[in-house]
Amino acid sequence: MLYGRDTELGTIERLLADARDGRSGVLVVRGEPGIGKTALLEHVLAGTDMRTIRGTGVEYEAELPYAGLSLLLRPALGHLDRLPDPQRQALAAAFGLAAGGRSEPMFVGLAVLSLLSEYAGDGPLLCVVDDAQWLDRASRDALVFAARRLYAEGIALIFAAREDRHAFPVQGLPELSLAALRPEHASALLDEHARDMSATTRYRVLVESRGNPLALIELPVSLAGERSGDTLRPGALPLTSRLQLAFHGQITRLHERTGMLLLLAASDDSGELGILLRAGAGFGAGPADLAAAEEASLIVVEDDRLRFRHPLIRAAVQQGAPIDRRLAAHRALADAFDAPDHADRRAWHLAAAATGVDEPAATALESTGERARERSGHLAAALAYEKAARLSEDVGARTRRLVLAAEAASEAGELDRARTFAERAQSTAIDDAIRARLLHVRALSDFWQGGFVNAHELLLRGAALTATGRPERAARMLLQSMHTAWYLGETELDSTMRELAALDLPPTASVTPVVEFMIAAFPPKPDSAHPGTAHPGTENPDAEHPGTESPDSEHAPNEHPAYEHPAAERPNLGDLIRVAPRTGNEEQRDLLLACGVGLALGQDADAHHIASLFARDSRLHGGIGRLPTILFFVAEAEIFESRHTDALATASEGLRIAQDSGQQQWISQFESVLAYLAGIAGDEEAAHRHADAALAGGVGSAMPAGAPWSAWALGLLDLGLGRPESALNRLERLAREPLRHHISATRSIPDLVEAAVRFGAPERAREPLARFEQWAERAEQRWADALVLRCHALLANDDAAEELWLAALARHESERRPLERARTGLLYGEWLRRLRRKTDARDRLRTALEEFDRLDARSWADRARTELGAIGGSATPQGPQPAGVLALLTPQELQITRLAAQGLSNRDIAAQLFLSPRTVGHHLYKAYPKLGIVSRTELTAIPELAALTG
């Protein structure tokens, strides 16, 4: 009987009802130990007719990647062959079922989503994970990623976890907190389990239990076993400790052999009965000795696996055992785990049994760390390496293992832990390459925690240490330091470029073409402008370690400096891509950086093409973590090309992935891009909502990554709504340090010029325009020339203006950047109206209005419509007439229909967009009526989709 949980059961029943109707959902049940989370889940499982799958996290000293996920999904592995090959390979490799390349937990999470969808079949599926706070990190990340992607698979996923949100962080997922039982329910539960109590004892139990169901059941047993002098004052111990004492009392009354088997079970998380009995044989214990523990309801044995009825029982067993018995238990378990596929468990038990330095155990743990890292279990690797370092006698081996631990912790996002490991290693590191790697770890920790100044300094010092002996490594550290320079200003960027230019790189090095491209893109100023800024490498440096994911090279803001060096040779992004290798992770990161720099140079078409290729590759091979970076480049290029519908779809997907993977920097960036798109549409509420979200994403004292784009978005919104003073004030902030070198600042200058002229302060536009003109001269793009001419036309007197307007319109290309072409036409039409050339003005304004309506640029359309009304010209009906039927689709529906029009199956689309096939089918079903069709075969007949897919 379950008492006092009708409200909670109602919430869960609604979740299950949705699953039966094909709508997936997730719920996190939280509460203190003993509050009834497991009992609630057991009650739900016992009463449902749905197919179920369940797993449990287990508190364990070791961190074994994907151990919890493997146990959860064991019943579903028969469906593994139905997954797309990359997902099947990733999941098999994660579980050690096959050799394979490293797959990030997010891609494993996608495979989990697909596998659960396949296992659910046509019916609903209930998936339950108890004690989720003890899942290994890789399992947790994969499951949470899958949970965030649930939609139309008919899956109900329930996690149960303790209140500590740091132990199981799932921000944004629905939660249900279990409170203490009400007095009447507590009394009913107590009566069910201990009816024959004196009134005094009953009152004491009710008071001490404080409505905790486990306490109501266990405290009567404990009190019955107390001698009169053993009683504790109520409240003398926390309830959890009181319960552990109650369980310990039951355990001490068992036979010694039974207690040893319980200690063996408590010392390992596998629960494999055969292993426990093999280890127990050395102590004379056998299967019969488990009977007493089962009768006391301390353990449950099912399917050759043993589990404790409650985690507090495990804790009571461990804490009540003397140290010599705990060490003996670990030694026995190490001997029992003698099969090759149990090498990691054996290594951890050897380490737990060690009482001092132990090189065999350290060597075994280092191998465990390597295996964990190969499976992207970075936290598991870090813990194994660090424990191996503690067991190492040789100073060099200890230092090397600590370096590996620091790097793995950095890859896991455990920044404080990574910094601590690096600082421990620095005192014994004597090799420059090792010291550089440690500096790199510290720099990444500072970067991600907003310490850009210190991160920049550490990267430069690390590069200085390796500049002579390992210039390629130094080059990559300097490339990464360009990102910290973006945040700091033009001086820091120029200093970095001079350090990069001073390297003596081999012509055949894979990084050399990228370095040459960067130097040509941002040629350093003469040394006289910046006196020596060499950074001595006298302290712990840290260069990049091969295979290390580099958040600041992949996840740095795509806000690139717009240096004005018109005399310098203009580098070509397309040429770089043709000559630079892109086979390894480092080479791909280098080229991804160059792709963003291509946007800084105005090479939007090349940047979009290359970023799209990177996106396709990441979708095919599981590079989910890198996709936000790539998709941001794609979205920027689409915005610059006035492809706003595409940009909305791209930015929306990028935001979802960034949120699902916890990449706060890119959440800020994509929110700012969505603010810009809302600003173009004149949607003031949405623009401010997205901008507020972007500006909430700062770390420490650091500027939020989306601040520059947000400033542009709100400035453009104000300009479109006829508030030039507010627009000018916002855009002028972009035109000053430390923001003026950002690409969004450069691209916003034409808007600043218009705002200044409309406000009546043209003098405030002249200096920014001079910089933009220099930039455009070097960009060598017709559209940039058109914008320069438009700005000069705004500032010119009437005698000179018309020639400039016409020249600007001639530079605009008829099929590209329609928004800018229409804005130039609008401004020219307004100028013509002021000169009372009504017929000429009417033609220009109508053309601009049609384009604004097609682009759903509502505030600009309203402005054109107002101008037409002022000269008595007829206008199109009030309201937007956006770009065809595609504007009726949601961003995700647009992506899915676009791929379906290319002939991709639902499975293929799901694999590309990191969804389940059922979710793809659901979105297509919703899209067809909007498009006026009934099947996917008709998609190719829609002209807008055909243009997109062609």
Image (cartoon, grey):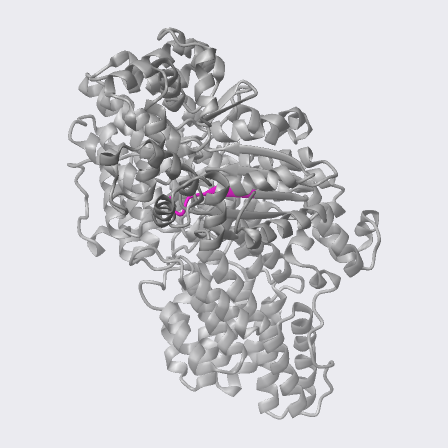
What is the x, y in percent for residue 579?
50, 35
Position above or below: 505 against 519: above
What is the x, y in percent for residue 176?
50, 52
Near-viewer residue (295 or 881):
295
Residue shown at the point (24%, 44%) measured from the top left: 233
The reply to whether residue 625 is in sight is no
Residue shown at the point (52%, 86%) measured from the top left: 799
Position above or below: 413 against 508: below
Residue shown at the point (27%, 53%) measured from the top left: 492
Near-viewer residue (530 or 267):
267
Q: Verify whether residue 162 appears in magenta.
A: yes
Position above or below: 263 against 711: above
What is the x, y in percent for residue 601?
46, 54
Near-viewer residue (417 or 187):
187
Residue shown at the point (51%, 26%) measured from the top left: 94
The magenta stretch is 158-166
Position above or below: 714 against 865: above
What is the x, y in percent for residue 788?
49, 70
